[in-house]
Amino acid sequence: DQQVKQNSPSLSVQEGRISILNCDYTNSMFDYFLWYKKYPAEGPTFLISISSIKDKNEDGRFTVFLNKSAKHLSLHIVPSQPGDSAVYFCAARRADGLTFGKGTHLIIQP
Amino acid sequence: NAGVTQTPKFQVLKTGQSMTLQCAQDMNHEYMSWYRQDPGMGLRLIHYSVGAGITDQGEVPNGYNVSRSTTEDFPLRLLSAAPSQTSVYFCASRGGGNSPLHFGNGTRLTVT
C-alpha cells in the first residue's frame, strides 16, 4: 500500500522553463511534507518542506504547493537549470520517520 | 563538517555471511535511521532510533539488527545475508522539531 505516490517516473524540461513535479498521498494524518533531490552515487539532499497548515512555501527558485483537500503537492522549479537534473523524491512525515515516493527523474534539456 | 558518514561505500557478500554497515554523525542528532533504496521502490525505513539506548523497527526490519550505544553511532547488522538484501543502504539523522533528515552517501551492498 503506497501512501506517497509519484506517478511520473521521468520528466524532461527545457533549460529556462518551469519544471513541475507532482506527488499524491493517501494518509490524511501526514502533517509535514518534504522534497529531496538525489544525484547518482550520493545520498538524498533536502530541498524544501511544507507544513500541512500552509499551502505554499518558497525558497529561491523552488516553490512547493500543498492542496490538502486533494491530498496533492507539487514542486515548481523556475527557471530550470542543467544542475537541476536529478531524481526528486517527495516524502511525508510519520511518527517513526519519512515515507518516500518512488521518485521522478528530472532531465533538463539544453 | 562531516555530517553523516557511512562505511564501507561498496560491499559484496556471499549468501549467509554477516556484516555490519557503519554510520556515524557529528551533529549531535538524537534521531537516526536506516533506509534501503531499491530500483522503482523509493526509500524504505528499516530501523530507527530516537536516542542512545532506544531503537525500533521501521517498515522493512526483517533480517537486520541495530543498536545505539552512543549518540554518534548507529550500526546496521546483517546476521545472515540473503540476495533479497542486495540494495543501497542510507543512514540518516535529524535534529528536533521540523528539522529535515540528513543522509549519508550510502553503502551499495551486493549479496551473491
Image: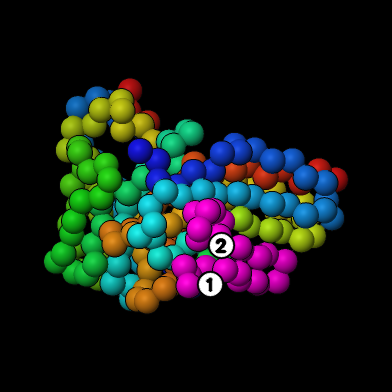
Q: In the rendered image of this protein, does residue B86 appear above or below residue A95? A: above
Residue A36 in view here = no
At a point 49% along the width and 54% down the height, the residue shown is: A71
Amino acid type, residue under disc 2 in the picture: Leu
Residue B101 image-quadrant placement: bottom left
Q: Residues within 10 Å of mark 2 (few under 14, many from 20)?
A: many
- Asked which secondary structure carries label 2, the reply is strand
Q: In the rendered image of this protein, does residue B69 appear above or below residue B21? A: below
Q: Quadrant of the C terminus of chain B?
A: top left
Left or right of B104 in this view: B55: left
Residue A102 in view here = yes
Give x and y (percent) for residue B2.
46, 68
At a point 19% along the width and 69% down the height, the residue shown is: B52
At a point 29% along the width and 62% down the height, the residue shown is: A95
Question: Does the magenta-highlighted stretch encompass residue A69?
Answer: yes
- Asked which secondary structure carries label 1, the reply is loop
Span of residues in magenta: A50-73
Q: Which residue is mark 2?
A: A66
Is the residue under label 1 in contact with that under label 2 (CB below 8 Å)? Answer: yes
Q: Which mark is residue A62?
A: none
Q: In the rendered image of this protein, does residue A76 appear above or below residue B50? A: above
Give x and y (percent) for residue A14.
82, 46
Q: Which residue is mark 1?
A: A54
Q: CA distance from mark 2 to mark 1?
A: 7 Å
Amino acid type, residue under disc 1 in the picture: Lys
Left or right of A74 in this view: A101: left
Chain of the residue on which disc 1 is drawn: A
Which residue is at the front of the view, A18 or B69? A18
The mark that comes first in sequence, 2 or 1, is 1
Residue A93 image-quadrant placement: bottom left
